[in-house]
Image (spheres, helix red, strand yellow):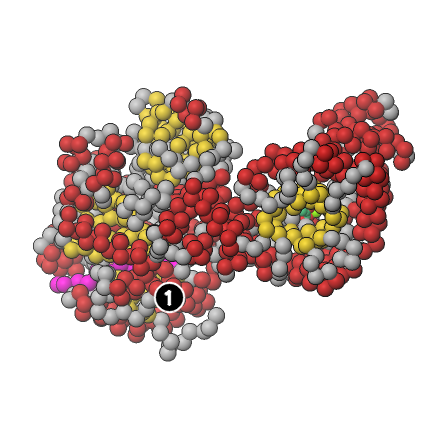
Amino acid sequence: METISKTKKQVYHFGTQETDGDRSMRNLLGGKGANLAEMSNLGIPVPPGFTITTEVCTKYNEVGREEVIALLKEEVEKAVASIEKEMETSFGDNENPLLLSVRSGARVSMPGMMDTVLNLGLNDESVLGLVKRTNNERFAWDSYRRFVQMYGGVVLGMKAETKEDENPFEEIIDNLKGKRRIKLDTQFTVQDLQDLVYDFKDAIKKSTGRDFPTDPWEQLWGSVMAVFDSWNGDRAVYYRKINGYPADWGTAVNVQAMVFGNMGDNSGTGVCFTRDAATGVNEFNGEYLINAQGEDVVAGVRTPQQITKMGSQRWAELAQIDEVERMKDFPSLEELMPKIYTELYEYQERLEKHYHDMQDMEFTIQNGKLWILQTRNGKRTGAAMVKIAMDLLKEGQVSEKEALLMIEANKLDELLHPIFDTNALKRAPVVAQGLPASPGAATGQIVFFADEADKFKNTILVRTETSPEDLEGMNLAKGILTARGGMTSHAAVVARGMGKCCVSGAGALKINYKKRSMTVGDQVYNEGDWISLNGSTGNIIEGKVATMEPELSGEFGELMELSNKFGNLKVRTNADNPKDAKIARNFGAQGIGLARTEHMFFEVDRIKAMREMILADTTKGRKAALEELLPMQRKDFEGIFEAMEGCPVTVRLLDPPLHEFVPHQLATQKELAEDLHISLSAVKNKVAELHEFNPMLGHRGCRLGITYPEITEMQTRAIMEAALNLKAKGIESKPEIMIPLVGSFEEFECQDKVIRDTAEVVFSEYGDTVDFTIGTMIEVPRAALMADTIAEKADFFSFGTNDLTQMTFGYSRDDAGKFLTVYLEEGILKNDPFEVLDQDGVGQLVDIGTKRGRSIKPDLKVGICGEHGGEPSSVEFCHSTGMDYVSCSPFRVPIARVAAAQAALK
Ligand code: PEP
Ligand code: MG
């Protein structure tokens, strides 16, 4: 990174008067900062403020607080003065104080993962100034107690002692409410709020040993540094890890004039979306609260109201609230403040058209004036992602290319997961209803604490509300259920981003963390009880519900067609039975890139003949056993070729070491001895004989076919006979025979001859022929280096990047788990190389192999069949090397198709 000096600009202004950034500066200003500047440029009312760049965060991590303050001091003081001028207030003034918010903002949105401080600038004197200026004593003291609470938690580090304990500030609030016999925050008197301020400060002093700072500048620097610190907090680190964001991006800090949604009934605050983030339907929607600050909406402490009239009516129906009660207690913004609503509607329309994407916006109404606090491309489910992209395309807002690039290929996975079986749902006992916050079907055992989300195999995390601390547990759980919070609560937003099923705001649930139970009416559910969540309806169901395959939407089909239009890399599948082949074909697979024949031998009816073959001491004995296997293999191939009619099918000859097929336990060894009418010791001796110290590098791959050519003969015969039998029925097959683990021309030549000779014999027996090709896997580093010789005979190459990764790194595929986690944590590896292709190292071999192969045979067909074939960044790499196809598991076929098209577009 470029080193930053005092002469370089580190602070950028935004607001209605002076703006020096724009949306293109996202890496430097963070997403929030860049968008605040952009909105200012568009003339949308944004409270004035400034952004400290992400580079300063990185600097802070190197040199620490004091040096960074010295670096920033002059620019920040100037920027604060400029806000003072625009807001006609003065920072630290006792009469007319300027209050500030301090928020994080990385280049990508990381909702709730970092810290925020609001109402900064208040102390025992300036709060009196605020009282006088606003003529609203209650508001001023409420703002002050919120500030002490937030600053105490975020900057001074005040926390609950154990997970069963409540947040210490909430405990103080609850105690006071109990004493005063009131239920709502809004019922606090000014005296109550003043008591809270002093009680909070005492509690902070007792718990952290620190006095609450009264100097606004000290408050400001403390908050800025706390935001920088939160970049390396547990939540943010975990979020970066699951999303693959590097630590050196850093976060920007946005300091902005406070506007207040809690100034009375003519004020409020809310969150809105230009389209539905769960389904993608093009409907403006959102939630707001009157007389509240932003955190109240997200934290789910009060029940938020809907922004649109239609949304409000739908919500009331779900909550079983009648029209009179709805209009009295929960009117929409559209009904309550029609003028503000119209203005907001106009901004959301303008912003979506400007960004050409669904926006997620935050706003505050202060004394009847609307301010927009933030806009960003909204997080959405996989289904919404597809619908929004296809709809924007139809509306002419984005081009085909842009629509395709809006798709996060891996997220398509969500659409392919099972949903609840519609028949089973009809009989399912619904115990309560919440909001359909994030669609999907989840069944699991109840847990109440995020750090216990892996207590059972499938869990449902049940919380009163979730907080950013719960992120890891939310990711582990199958579904999330909260008693409080609306569609924009933390749980809802995070779950949608993860594509995880979530039902929020189920008010009928009473959760008791100490007893680890929840009650609905008089029904009690304990930890470990099974429940199911329907994230599309908000239904909470007792017990388990059966699932079925999902139906894919029309937009999904449109996306797939669009991908075909741009992708020139073909997509095949790895499948070794007709069922998987059909699934993949339905997803658009254009052939099979890898049929692993060994999987076929494990089925009960074959394993015996297979073991007989392995235990045979003579070629004759082996041939007799292979004779038994032949009809079964032939049938397997007939099924697969038929399912893939007309498409190429790459069949790989037997690959794994033979010891994998023999029994290792005494009981099964005895059984085998009886079955084969041989002694137990003969079985034991054979098993011992097959033992290898390093089976992955042992007697496997083409080494089997070279030492036992009769295996290759049998497999070739089965393939050719299957193809000929189908041909007789008018079904076309395109077999491609693949020799595994080749490292030299001679190995390939040996097996090539066995295959061709066998095919000749079969063809003359049948008096007919079929076209076939013979190729090899490139999975031993030497094969990549010797590719120009191997290509003299081979018709095609398929990179087996699982083995190629294993052998290039020297990491055993079977044992790497032991150290890879540490490597990833320590940053020694950026990704697991068995998941994401190591382009720097293994990629070189792929590139060399392809180039050397094609130097001899320019039209050599080249593909990949390792696990990387369905991973988007690896697919992009394969495209760049000029491969013909990628091959991946059936459910990754749609992902690979989109990734292939994106690679071509990039
Ligand atoms: C490979 O090695 O990449 C491969 C596809 O083969 P297997 O995983 O069966 O070893
Ligand atoms: Mg392999």
The segment highlighted magenta reads 95-106
Left or right: 213, with 667 as reference point:
left
Q: How many marks?
A: 1
Residue at left offset 38%, top offset 56% = 398
Let me know if residue 96 is in the magenta part: yes
Left or right: 594, with 904 as reference point:
right
* Residue 27 x %, y %: 41, 64
Residue at left offset 35%, top offset 69% = 69
| Helix, strand or loop for disc 1 | helix
Q: Name the foreground residue: 160 vs 733.
A: 733
* Residue 384 x %, y %: 39, 45
The kind of residue tagged 1 is: Ser
The residue identified by callout 1 is 24
Q: Would you say the beta carbon of the disc 1 residue lies within 8 angstroms of ligand 1?
A: no
The crowd level at tag 1 (other Cα within 10 Å; few <14, some 14-19, many 20+) is few
Let me know if residue 713 is in the magenta part: no
Image position of 372 with respect to 319: above or below: below
Which residue is outermost to the bottom?
7
Q: Name the foreground residue: 26 vs 524.
A: 26
Residue at left offset 21%, top offset 69% = 17
Instruction: Choose top left, top right, bottom left or bottom right for residue 501.
Output: top left
